[in-house]
Image: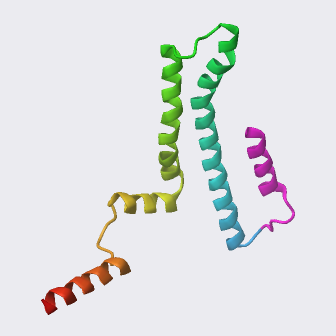
């Protein structure tokens, strides 16, 4: 997995296809670096959380560890925690994701009018006026 990240990084920094210079290209390179950083953090979290459980599965046929032990169950909980960590990692490393995540949780500032709610409000006003 980390070999793939290294390949992407070398492609982004050394590729003759990606032009250098100009404000637009600097912005694009910056976004690529931020995306690569987010992917690297996610990959490290996945490795840290999944490696212990996979080690138990690999060692259990040799009698070194037992599947179903409290250690095994604890490491499986760690795997589930990784799934919960991913949205938080995305939120801390990506401004656009963070903005949409706040909207999803209802933490947006100010009142925004969405077309769907405006339509529903107009329909309910029309039905109450005719009643």
Residue 92 colored magenta?
no
Q: In this picture, which residue range is highlighted in magenta?
A: 1-20
State the count of labels: 0
Q: Residue furthest top?
A: 63
> In the depicted view, which residue is nearer to us: 23 or 108?
108
Q: Could you tell me which residue is drawn at 65 percent across and 67 percent down?
A: 27
> In the depicted view, which residue is nearer to us: 12 or 71?
71
Q: Position of residue 98 (x, y in %)?
A: 46, 57
Residue 7 colored magenta?
yes
Q: Is residue 83 left or right of residue 58?
A: left
The chief SS type of the magenta part is helix
Q: Could you tell me which residue is drawn at 79 percent across and 67 percent down?
A: 20
Q: Position of residue 14 (x, y in %)?
A: 84, 56
Q: Could you tell me which residue is drawn at 68 percent across and 66 percent down?
A: 28
Q: Quadrant of the C terminus?
A: bottom left
- Name which quarter of the figure residue 43 lies in: top right
């Amino acid at each position: 997995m980390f070999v793939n990240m290294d390949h992407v990084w070398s492609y982004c920094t050394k590729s003759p296809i990606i032009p250098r210079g100009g404000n637009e290209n600097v912005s694009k390179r910056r976004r690529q670096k931020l995306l690569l950083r987010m992917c690297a953090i996610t990959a490290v979290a996945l490795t840290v959380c999944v490696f212990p459980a996979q080690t138990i599965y690999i060692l259990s046929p040799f009698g070194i560890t037992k599947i179903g032990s409290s250690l095994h169950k604890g490491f499986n909980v760690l795997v589930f925690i990784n799934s919960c960590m991913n949205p938080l990692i995305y939120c801390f490393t990506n401004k656009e994701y963070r903005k949409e995540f706040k909207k999803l949780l209802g933490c947006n500032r100010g009142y925004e009018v969405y077309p769907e709610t405006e339509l529903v409000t107009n329909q309910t006003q029309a039905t109450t006026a005719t009643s």
